[in-house]
């Protein structure tokens, strides 16, 4: 045989094995997506045996390619590839979707060769952009990022954010493989087999686009060879494929999405696929790379605010991020075209090589952070806190992906003033608290902000910081210490009548309330709950012991899911009676106005706190 | 003068007045976006005086065009148009951004001529698609939808979802006007003045694209004339413009985004703009249309489940939606390419003319619902509950828009089983509770679901229902009554030892726990809190009185922001001691498994409830 013929024979055998195994493991599971796997089997057979560079024994090899199944429901194909590569056994393959198996219904990093969880469509490519940015601009390593896309998910706008950004940043290390099998979950996709339409869109977005028959090995091979050549643009291979390819009663048939074959059907299918015994097909290893020498980290020299003038916490964020940048070369800045508002521009100006503008594309913003996390960078991504709602699905999935990302949202709450409710984050604490394993910080002062930013860099998981638009007085010394899970008692005496818990902008209102009440000879304890999650329960419990069971929690947020609920939650964990807790929060839709007018209107001003204290103490 | 010359003179005068007023009102406010208004002034002058059909005295005229400023920060221009049209006074214009003014920093429906709130970029066009679908396919009215887009926001994927859907549905009543002024907030946009790139992208997405000089009146006029002709495709006018056009020190200058002029600068600017006295420029009125005769509504004949077999609440949703469709011709169905999972397909099959497939584009899905609400339809939009996280910003903004939309999310919680965490909604209750004025429902049985779906149709604001994948026993009779804000006591006796609050899938676990405990001679009260927001506080308070101060709340959701927090919140509103409340919720990241295995693993199974009861009663 010619070399080509040999290769084609090998690809054919491998692809058939991948199909057989995709069917076998889903039938064993009783659920899953065999037909969505079968359409891409030829593509993946050629990729893994001829183009992928991956050392399954050393998933940490920095030169490894990245293979992201954006169509996560094709996990049977992915896991069958792992088996074909010799990375997992046939027995493990057959644990698919079973309780306790790492081979879940959709891929997650429970498997060491999976970079990120997929299954919420339209996320693999934006994350791939993040990895590609790291590979091309930060690590300068030869690896490729291969992203397998389904055609249904091309309706997700997030994919077009990724197309846009990938060409903007000339990511020629990124290759998308579009498995255009025509059929979605419930019927035909919008564009069906109109590969020309996909081609035109991709080209208009600045990509190389190669249209092929996804079952013709020579076309596939040629396409991968072209795509693997760096030429200044990312490449998409638009492969016309047949869903269920290889089995007569599955091919191009509706009603077979997400459906396992019965044992009888399996037998018939395997017969048609010329079921051969399982073979192992070695995957080329990349050169063994060295993890880049940890560039000498220096001690962080955080900005210090002497308190002579008021400083917005968003500004302190920018200053601190720049300081982190000086100390640690792994810190990366990302922002959604508002870096002069979030003050990420402080970092961008100082370290332009480690700053990647993500424009007004918040899904891509968070996805790029996840991609940076895959490459062990320390990404900080910022935009207006309100606009992180745009990326909630990406944040949710980042938690499933075990990503380590830091999100910083500015312009929180009604205290932003005149811009109105579209720009006011009033649900961000609720949203971010309800993310698995998340950390939520809401500093009230510049020195505190700076220290917390430094702690964020060292902290894993999804870490969120909420910053304030307005300049606020500096309350703390640069030498005060703060911690994730901490709080500060900012006012206390032996005659405290109740406890006010606040954070961020409302801490300043609480302090004004304190002064007003003190002039009336009423003293209150004021706690700065800057760590909203985890919350410093001990300090709250101590207040209940020492001050008594009356609390007011005041926050620039809707009543649901924020600091007030965090305090309530804390007390349910305590033995002993629940205290009386009054929540002051934003109860009606704000409009425009000055920060002071809006805080007053929302019932979270110093005046409102004084009133609530008086009511609770039955002074009126 | 020729007719054209007369028109050009009028457009010129109007455009200069719009620029003058955009500057005046922002300088008066001390903030706002004059330069982003000035770039689009010529475009809007031609539109309002020659193409827009709108009766400002009758904003409810069904034939009115719809003008959506997707670049909501150009509100000074919009309000200046209102003044020019004679709809508001100059004095009111100068209240911009002041507390109590309806002229907020970004447009909201506080103004009767504003359809939807904008200011979170990338939302105007997707909503416009929803209005256009209603206009073309449901109302068959001649109105146009004109959407003013900024160039920065073209990075938002949601806009490409809209481009995709608009051409798919041949929405030739939709015209996008892209104000390509090159400058974003912090610098140049990704594509700058590369109008050819925008043109290629729009055409690849199936649109007519007309590139013009946005300050050349004849080009503008010709473009609008072409765009207004129905030709089977939506049209985008890509207008190359100059930010700050008309004032020498503002034109095409960085550093002027979102910045008002000082009084001195204002004086200089108005001098350059040949400040003329304010004129009124009448806007053509459309023919006075009749609101379509309320098509005879029939009584809803809801499906009735006799309890002989288990029924998934998602299936009951589909059945009930179909029944609503029979009774009320204003009911519209929308789904994100999973209607065979959400069971919206029941409606789609019965009423294909009122069903609009939104494919896998959840932002467009919610935006289409908002657009339908603008046209007084009763939209029900469904997808997996987890995937509504994709559209959280749209849901948040829908509340600012005072939209009436109904969202139904299926496949909630770990109880979906094998598909794994990417498909499990575990934060949806937190997310939806933290939406202003929202209603959150979580039925546990098919008959209850059907009744609640009927109530949703009559209920305003953002109404969310969470449904369950698994088939569950029918608990209620078709004649039982349910209400928004209600609950049901499903088990009670005079010797109840504590109260378990559950909803949806966990209600069934609670009932199993009841049976197990009863066999041990322990009776508990079980409350079905199917209305999570508003919560039936009275029934909870009564339980505290009658049963005592021990509660267990069990939910298939993260611990933050769900039913447990709703119950806690309720008790803070009550006089009297806080009860002891134990929250059972999902505490660790689930994997794949059977529903029973995952409920057990999450600690929210019947077994876990029995254990929690025993601990709380100190029986172990």
Image (cartoon, coloured by chain):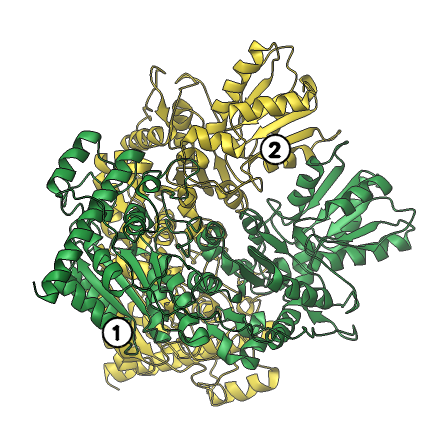
Chain colours: A yellow, B green
- Name above or below for residue B164 compared with residue B244: below
At x 53%, y 58%, the residue is B404
Q: Label 1 belongs to which residue?
A: A199
Secondary element under disc 1, as helix, strand or loop, is helix
Residue at the left extreme of this rendering: B1
Q: Nearer the viewer, residue B483 or B215?
A: B215
- Residue B203 locus on image (x, y percent): 24, 71
Mark 2 burial class by Cα count in 10 Å: few <14, some 14-19, many 20+: many
Secondary element under disc 2, as helix, strand or loop, is strand
Mark 1, chain letter?
A: A
Taking the image as drawn, is residue A276 in sight? yes
Taking the image as drawn, is residue A208 in sight? no
* Disc on the earlier residue, 2 or 1: 1
Q: Nearer the viewer, residue B292 or B58?
A: B58
Within the image, what quadrant is residue B115 found in? bottom left
Left or right for B500, reference A220: right
Left or right for A142, reference B430: left
Q: Label 2 belongs to which residue?
A: A583
Mark 2, chain letter?
A: A
- Residue A569 locus on image (x, y percent): 64, 37
Q: CA distance from mark 2 to mark 1?
A: 55 Å
Q: Nearer the viewer, residue B450 or B189?
A: B450
Within the image, what quadrant is residue A282 found in? bottom left
At x 43%, y 56%, the residue is A116
- Name above or below for residue A311 compared with residue A441: above
- Quarter occupied by the N terminus of chain B: bottom left
- Residue B537 locus on image (x, y percent): 73, 45
């Amino acid at each position: 045989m010619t070399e080509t013929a040999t290769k084609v024979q090998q690809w054919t055998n491998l692809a058939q094995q991948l199909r057989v195994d995709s069917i076998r493991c889903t039938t064993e599971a009783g659920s899953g997506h065999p037909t969505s796997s079968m359409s891409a089997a030829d593509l993946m057979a050629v990729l893994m045996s001829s183009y992928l560079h991956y050392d399954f024994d050393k998933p940490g090899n920095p030169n490894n390619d990245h293979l992201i199944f954006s169509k996560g429901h094709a996990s049977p194909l992915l896991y069958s590839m792992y088996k074909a590569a010799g990375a997992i056994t046939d027995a493990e393959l057959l644990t698919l979707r079973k309780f306790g198996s790492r081979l879940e219904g959709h891929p997650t990093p429970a498997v060491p060769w999976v970079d990120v969880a997929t299954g919420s469509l339209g996320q693999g490519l934006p994350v791939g952009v993040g990895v590609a940015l790291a590979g091309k601009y930060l690590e300068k390593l030869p690896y490729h990022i291969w992203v397998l896309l389904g055609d249904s998910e091309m309706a997700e706008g997030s994919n077009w954010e990724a197309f846009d950004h990938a060409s903007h940043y000339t990511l020629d290390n990124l290759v998308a493989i579009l498995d255009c099998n025509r059929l979605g979950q419930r019927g035909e996709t919008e564009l069906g087999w109109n590969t020309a339409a996909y081609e035109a869109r991709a080209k208009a977005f600045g990509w190389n686009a190669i249209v092929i028959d996804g079952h013709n090995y020579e076309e596939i091979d040629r396409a991968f060879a072209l795509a693997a050549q760096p030429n200044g643009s990312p490449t998409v291979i638009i492969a016309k494929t047949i869903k269920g390819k290889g089995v007569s009663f599955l091919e191009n048939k509706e009603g077979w999405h997400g459906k396992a074959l019965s044992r009888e059907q399996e037998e018939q299918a395997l017969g048609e696929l010329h079921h051969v015994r399982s073979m192992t097909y070695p995957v080329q290893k990349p050169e063994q790379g060295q993890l880049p020498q940890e560039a000498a980290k220096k001690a962080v020299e955080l900005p210090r605010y002497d308190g002579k003038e008021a400083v917005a916490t968003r500004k302190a964020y920018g200053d601190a991020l720049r300081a982190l940048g000086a100390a640690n070369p792994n810190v990366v800045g990302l922002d959604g075209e508002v870096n002069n508002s979030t003050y990420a521009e402080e970092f961008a100006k100082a370290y332009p090589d480690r700053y990647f503008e993500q424009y007004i594309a918040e899904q891509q913003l968070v996805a790029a952070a996840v991609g940076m996390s895959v490459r062990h960078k320390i990404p900080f991504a910022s935009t207006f806190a309100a606009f992180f709602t745009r990326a909630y699905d990406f944040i949710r999935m980042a938690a499933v992906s075990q990503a380590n990302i830091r999100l910083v949202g500015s312009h929180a709450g009604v205290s932003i003033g005149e811009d109105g409710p579209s720009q006011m984050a009033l649900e961000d604490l609720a949203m971010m608290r309800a993310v698995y394993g998340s950390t939520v910080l809401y500093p009230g002062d510049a020195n505190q902000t700076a220290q917390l930013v430094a702690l964020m860099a060292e902290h894993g998981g999804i870490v969120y910081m909420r910053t304030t638009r307005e300049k606020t007085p500096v309350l703390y010394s640069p030498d005060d210490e703060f911690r994730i899970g901490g709080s500060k008692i900012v006012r206390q005496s032996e005659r405290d009548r109740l406890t006010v818990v606040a954070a961020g902008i409302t801490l300043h209102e609480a302090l004004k309330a304190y002064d007003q009440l003190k002039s009336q000879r009423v003293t209150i304890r004021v706690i700065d709950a800057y760590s909203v999650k985890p919350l410093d329960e001990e300090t709250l419990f101590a207040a209940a012991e020492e001050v008594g069971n009356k609390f007011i929690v005041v926050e620039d947020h809707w009543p649901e899911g924020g600091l007030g609920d965090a305090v309530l939650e804390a007390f349910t964990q305590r033995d002993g009676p629940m205290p009386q807790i009054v929540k002051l929060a934003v109860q009606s839709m704000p409009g425009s106005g000055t920060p002071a007018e809006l805080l007053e209107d929302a019932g979270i001003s110093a005046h409102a706190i004084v009133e609530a204290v008086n009511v609770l103490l039955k002074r009126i």
